[in-house]
Image (cartoon, rainbow, N blue to C red):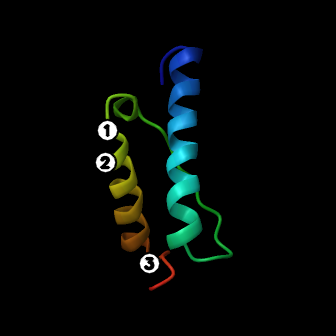
């Protein structure tokens, strides 16, 4: 996903999103892999949160599923 500065920024953004969303929404006992793409840098933070929530619903990996 680019040079090391960009890769680390993507990693930090995705880690922050995961910390915010997975604790409250994801079912326990799951191993999830989140892959960062080039668009992660430009994507607004609220959109990343919405994307992860949508992905969890599609996978039926949320607590309510």
Task: Provide the residue designation for mark 2.
Answer: 47
Left or right, 36 with respect to 40, comes to right
Q: Pointers 3 and 2 in contact (CB under 8 A)?
A: no
**Residue 36 locus on image (x, y percent):** 47, 38
Q: Which mark is residue 20?
A: none
Q: Residue 59 appears at what percent x and percent y?
A: 43, 71
Q: Nearer the viewer, mark 1 or mark 3?
A: 1
Q: Residues within 10 Å of mark 3 (few under 14, many from 20)?
A: few
Structural distance between the alpha carbons of marks 3 and 2: 20 Å
Q: Quadrant of the C terminus?
A: bottom left
Q: Is residue 48 above or below residue 40?
A: below
Q: Residue furthest right?
A: 29
**Separation of marks 1 and 3 at Cα, in angstroms:** 25 Å
Q: Position of residue 41 (x, y in %)?
A: 39, 29
Q: Position of residue 8 (x, y in %)?
A: 59, 25
Q: Secondary structure at mark 1?
A: loop
- What residue do we see at 65% from left, 64% from top? 31
User: Which residue shows up at 39% across the image and 63% down it?
Assistant: 53
Going from N to C along the chain, the mark reached first, 1 or 3, is: 1
Looking at the rendered image, the disc whose residue lies closer to the viewer, 3 or 2, is 2
Tell me which label, 3 or 2, sits earlier in the chain: 2
Seen at 32% across and 36% down, the residue is 43
- Mark 2–mark 1 Cα distance, whole angstroms, equals 5 Å
Q: Is residue 55 above or below residue 12?
A: below
Instruction: Please report contact status of discs 2 and 1: CB closer than 8 Å, yes or no.
Output: yes
Residue on which the image places disc 3: 60
Drawn side of residue 28 relative to residue 2, left or right:
right
At horizontal 55% and vertical 45% (from top left) the residue drawn is 16
* Mark drawn on residue 44: 1
């Amino acid at each position: 996903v680019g040079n090391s500065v960009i890769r680390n920024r993507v990693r930090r953004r995705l880690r922050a999103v995961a910390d915010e969303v997975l604790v409250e929404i994801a079912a326990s006992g799951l191993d999830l892999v989140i892959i960062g793409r080039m668009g992660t840098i430009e994507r607004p933070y609220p959109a990343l949160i919405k994307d992860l929530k949508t992905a969890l619903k599609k996978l039926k990996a949320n607590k309510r599923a």
